[in-house]
Amino acid sequence: MIDVSDGLVQDAGHLCRASGAGAEILAARLPVAPACRRALGAAAALFAATVGEDYELLVALPPRAERALRRVRRRLGCRLTRIGRIVAGRPIIRLVDAAGRRLAPPRPGFDHFR
């Protein structure tokens, strides 16, 4: 688990490097505020994947934990969104559109040292 305050793509990369796996993130599944969708249109998901300051948590769980996770969600009353999957191999983050085409973010997220 990691917070995504420096940008989803960047922070997912930290999680993947620590676990020795990669991830595929489905841009169309990212929760984006309606006002952001109206303002940015098709670019809204890419914006949401790379801009920091969004204080949400990214959690990686095995598929067998889904039932237990639904119970926890109901008990806590919070929203959970499946946005992708962990894949074997190098710790690379693939951000893809609904057709499976790879999206190239302009930057992975916020860099504290630039």
Image: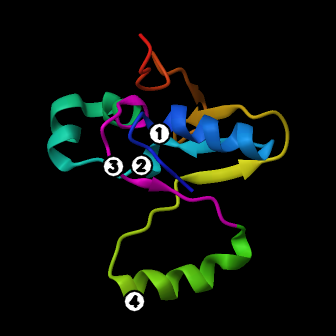
Q: Would you name the residue on which mark 4 appears? A: 75
The quarter holding residue 15 reads top right
Q: Earlier in the sequence, mark 3 or mark 2?
A: 2
Magenta stretch, residue numbers: 48-61
Q: Is residue 53 magenta?
A: yes
Task: Look at the numbered disc 3 and give the secondary structure of its residue.
Answer: loop
Give the number of the mark in front: 4 or 2. Answer: 4
Q: Earlier in the sequence, mark 3 or mark 4?
A: 3
Q: Is residue 101 above or below residue 104?
A: below
Q: Would you name the residue on which mark 3 appears? A: 55
Q: Earlier in the sequence, mark 4 or mark 2?
A: 2
Q: Is residue 8 left or right of residue 55?
A: right
Residue 13 visible, this angle: yes
Mark 1 → mark 2, Cα distance in angstroms: 10 Å
Task: Look at the numbered disc 4 and give the secondary structure of its residue.
Answer: helix
Q: Earlier in the sequence, mark 1 or mark 4?
A: 1
Q: Earlier in the sequence, mark 1 or mark 2?
A: 1
Give the number of the mark in front: 3 or 2. Answer: 3
Q: Earlier in the sequence, mark 1 or mark 3?
A: 1
Task: Look at the numbered disc 1 and give the secondary structure of its residue.
Answer: helix
- Looking at this view, is 88 or 52 the one in front? 52
Q: Would you name the residue on which mark 1 appears? A: 8
Residue 83: mark: none
Q: Would you name the residue on which mark 2 appears? A: 30
- Residue 30 placed where, x, y %? 41, 49
- Residue 50 placed where, x, y %? 42, 30
Q: Residue at x 62, y 35 (%)?
A: 13
